[in-house]
Amino acid sequence: MTKQDCTDGHREDIHWPSLIAAISSISAVGIAIGLGLPLLSMILEKRGIPSTLIGLNSAMAGIASMMAAPVTTRLAHDFGVARTMIGAVIVAAISALGFYYAEAFWMWFPLRLFFHGATTTLFILSEFWINAAAPPSRRGLVLGIYSTVLSIGFAAGPFLFSFLGSEGILPFAIGAATILLAAVPIFLARNESPVLDEKPDMHFFRYIFLVPTATAAVFVFGAASVGGLSLFPIYATRAGFTEAQSALLLTVMGVGNMVFQIPLGMLSDILKDRRLLLFLLALIGLCGSLLIPILAHSWLAMALLLLLWGGCVSGLYTIGLSHLGSRLTGSDLAAANAAFIFCYAVGTVAGPQAVGSAMDLAGNQGFSWAISGFFGLYVLLSVSRLFFKSSRG
């Protein structure tokens, strides 16, 4: 077994050097995505690009992730986890800066592929590294810490955007520099990185359906979070908010993510069935997305809604990953985590495209309707899974 196999129950300590290195890399990803998604969408909006095409360009992130997820484990096996992560950091930083110099809209499509392919590699290997650092009985707590730091990155990105705006090279340079900083802790902890010396028992795509409640949860998270982050600034400005106000609303949503993840993770550690918690989080997400157009007249009301809604939406990722980790171990867990990220990527393709198309077809209200649809589908799935278990019992 590799170092992540902790099922003997004797290891209850948290391997902090590994955890710090993995979390540092993922925090850079969060900042870059939190800054980049509203920044790029706002620039395209100012250029007169239709919402559908903006959503299509944002959806390239998911296509890149789907391309990167199946090969990341192989790269890490051949070159090592830490070395592969450092290479991904460099590719992400260069491509992030490249958006500023790419004047033609078509050039943003390959740049999205490189940027999000690299950040997907960082996601997968960071989470694999975290699984190696976390004892099974405290996995929810560790993943709660991980998700909290990721949420700080998502909150810091729009917060930076509210100050930097969308003009000039400065926001791009800051984003690229932030990503490069992630290489430092990875390099320092390179000898602590886990080793991939086993092959999974099944084909990659079979892991998608192995724990469907977890993979469906991350699909909805990807659709709602990326679709929302990409097009919420446009929705908010059309609803009457300023560019800075819309960015601060995204920051408030990020604050909600930070507040909720550790308590949700700790709660998941004591639950016998995490699927009930996933259902409740999805139900809150559905109700919250339906309330968005009703509260759009008030910045304060919208901020309070997004504070709660954002925490519950990100909880789908945290608890879904914890649920996955409770079912699998060893190389199967590493492969399932790649499949988990693959499903997230599918969501990031479906989300921006669905939200952008809905806004073109139904006006500003389409933003809420599209996101509500994703949550509604997951509520139905989670109810059916719980009922299926009850029936079998």
Image: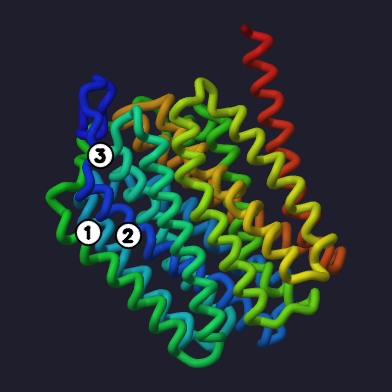
Image height of 137 relative to 245, above or below: above
The percent position of residue 323, horizontal first and vertical second, equals 48, 31
Judging from the image, the colouring scheme is rainbow
Q: Gap between marks 2 and 1, in whole Å?
A: 7 Å
Say which residue label 2 marks.
25
Say which residue label 1 marks.
186
Looking at the rendered image, the quarter that the N terminus falls into is top left
Which is more toward the observer, 18 or 203?
18
* In this picture, residue 43 sits left or right of residue 342: right
Q: Residue at x 54, y 56 (%)?
A: 62
Q: Are marks 2 and 1 in contact (CB under 8 Å)?
A: yes
- Which three-letter amino acid code belongs to the residue tagged 3? Ile
Looking at the rendered image, the quarter that the C terminus falls into is top right
Closer to the chain start, of discs 2 and 1, is 2
- The local crowd at label 2, few if under 14, some if 14 to 19, many if 20 or more residues have their Cα within 10 Å, is many
The percent position of residue 347, horizontal first and vertical second, equals 60, 50
Closer to the chain start, of discs 3 and 1, is 3
Say which residue label 3 marks.
14
